[in-house]
Amino acid sequence: MSDTYVLVHGAWHTGAEIEAVADGVRAAGHTVYCPTLAGNNPGDDRSSTGLEDAIASAVRYIEEKDLTQVRLVGHSYGGMVISGVADRIAHRLKRLVYINAFVPLDGESLNDMVPPHYVNVRCRRRGQRQRGDAALRDLARGLHQRRRPRDRAGAYEKLNPHPYRTFTDKIRLSQPLAALALGKSYLNCQQDTAMPHGLPWHPRLSERLGLFRLVECPGSHEMFFSNPKRLAQAIIEAGRD
């Protein structure tokens, strides 16, 4: 049976970087879309784009394509976006899948869920009027921690500046995510060190989903680059009925 997946990228990414994983899901017979969120397209105004703009762009994408029964997948920052999408158009969705992703409460920002020193680094980088290379370098060091230097350099070249307001804007949810009448899954990549072990992705954030399916697989935060075939397999397992 063919299912419909929409894969939502994380910060500093576009839909193009997750196409390798999408191809793996398509090879299993499913339909997959990889939109690029507002704020991450070439020419987008990073200084004015906020979280609601990103959420609205994903909602618009699903509505314009008239997609239903969607298995909506979010990676990292993408968890903020799919949470907002689910709050607004739950009737078009079948299941939420979070891949080492943020699971917010109403009135919470992404920065509220990370260690203080992460926020301090982002604030300093925000103040630098440049292309965003310094922030990307910090990100690449942490997220590609298990890759060879040559592979890290290649991944770095694929990243792009990200709108800082999407980290500080507080999401508005009409009800807790646990109360949504949708299937929910959390996919935990076990060697992910993008968050410190004292503030883990799972179970600290995953338990906010209420009743959910846990899928775990070996890998780091950037399996979209490092092992797309294995991640595609895990997404299908997490997305099934």
Image (cartoon, helix red, strand yellow):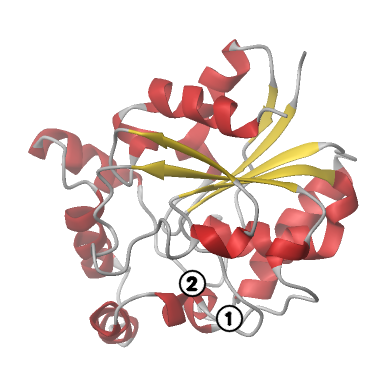
Task: Give the residue drawn at x 68%, y 70%.
Answer: 53
Vertical arrangement, residue 138 with respect to residue 64, above or below? below
- 67 left or right of 25 in image: right
Residue occupied by mark 1: 48
Vertical arrangement, residue 196 with respect to residue 30, above or below? below
**Secondary structure under the numbered disc 2 in the rendered image:** loop
**Secondary structure under the numbered disc 1 in the rendered image:** loop
Q: In which quarter of the image is the N terminus?
A: top right
- 11 left or right of 212 in image: left
The amino acid sitting under disc 1 is Ser
Residue occupied by mark 2: 163
Residue 230 drawn at (x, y percent): 39, 23
Disc 2 residue crowd, few under 14, some 14–19, many 20+, Cα 10 Å: many
Task: Give the residue drawn at x 33%, y 27%.
Answer: 227
Task: Give the residue drawn at x 67%, y 12%.
Answer: 29
Disc 1 residue crowd, few under 14, some 14–19, many 20+, Cα 10 Å: few
The amino acid sitting under disc 2 is Pro
- 161 left or right of 41 in image: left
Q: Quadrant of the C terminus?
A: top right
Task: Give the residue drawn at x 50%, y 63%.
Answer: 102
- 235 left or right of 1 in image: left
Residue toward you, 179 or 187? 179
Whether residue 43 is visible to the viewer of this picture, yes or no, is no
Residue 199 drawn at (x, y percent): 31, 69
Residue 220 drawn at (x, y percent): 28, 42
